[in-house]
Image (cartoon, rainbow, N blue to C red):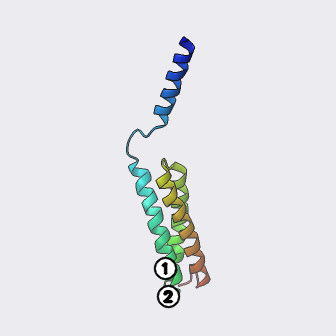
Amino acid sequence: MSQQATGGDARQRGVRAQSEAGPHRRQDVLAVVALTLGVAALVLGWIPAAHFAGALLGVIGLPVALYSQMISATTNERWLNVIGMITAFVGAGFALSHGGFSI
């Protein structure tokens, strides 16, 4: 009987240990930065005259999104990171097809 009570306490401690302890400001900021860089790269990648800026933002945004994904703590952050990764990659691709890093 006492083992069941001890096992129940251990399970409750595990649940509490996995719950969120507090705000994740650094992770939230990185997720928003990754999303912003990705969307900016996508928009600038569509514009042929802005191919350099689009390629640059895409090349910067993809590693930022990957790092942010690695340290993310919540599902919401992961969603923003994945969207940022995809938009940065596609934006860099569009920008490279319009001339890439040539000025």
Residue 49 is marked as 2
The local secondary structure at tag 2 comes to helix
Could you tell which of marks 1 and 2 lies nearer the N-terminus?
Answer: 1
Q: Residue at the location (43% across, 40% down)? A: 20
Expressed as whole percent of the image width and height from the top left, the position of residue 91 reads 55, 75
Dot 1 amino acid type: Leu
Residue appearing at x 56%, y 80% in the figure: 95
**Numbered disc 1: secondary structure:** helix
Query: Mark 1 near mark 2, Cβ–Cβ under 8 Å?
Result: no
In the rendered view, tell whether residue 73 sits above or below residue 41. Answer: above
Q: How many residues crowd around disc 1 within 10 Å: few (fewer than 14), some, or many (20 or more)?
A: many
Residue drawn at (58%, 85%) of the image: 98
Q: Which residue is mark 1?
A: 44
Residue 89's x, y, as percent? 58, 70
Q: Is residue 28 above or below residue 1?
A: below
- Furthest toward the front, the residue is 1
The label number, if any, that marks residue 1 in the structure image:
none
Query: Which residue is outermost to the top?
Result: 2
Q: CA distance from mark 1 to mark 2?
A: 8 Å
Q: In this orientation, which residue lies closer to the viewer: 2 or 81? A: 2
The answer to whether residue 53 is visible is: no
Name the residue rendered at 48%, 78% in the picture. 43
**Tally of marks:** 2
Q: Nearer the viewer, residue 25 or 5?
A: 5
Query: Which residue is at the far bottom?
Result: 49
Could you tell me if residue 48 is visible in this image? Answer: yes
Q: Type of residue at label 2?
A: Ala
In the depicted view, which residue is nearer to us: 3 or 46?
3
Instruction: Please state the horizontal and vertical placement of residue 48, each as a whole percent of the image.
Output: 53, 87
- Residue 3, quarter of the rendered image: top right
Residue 60, percent from left and from top? 51, 66
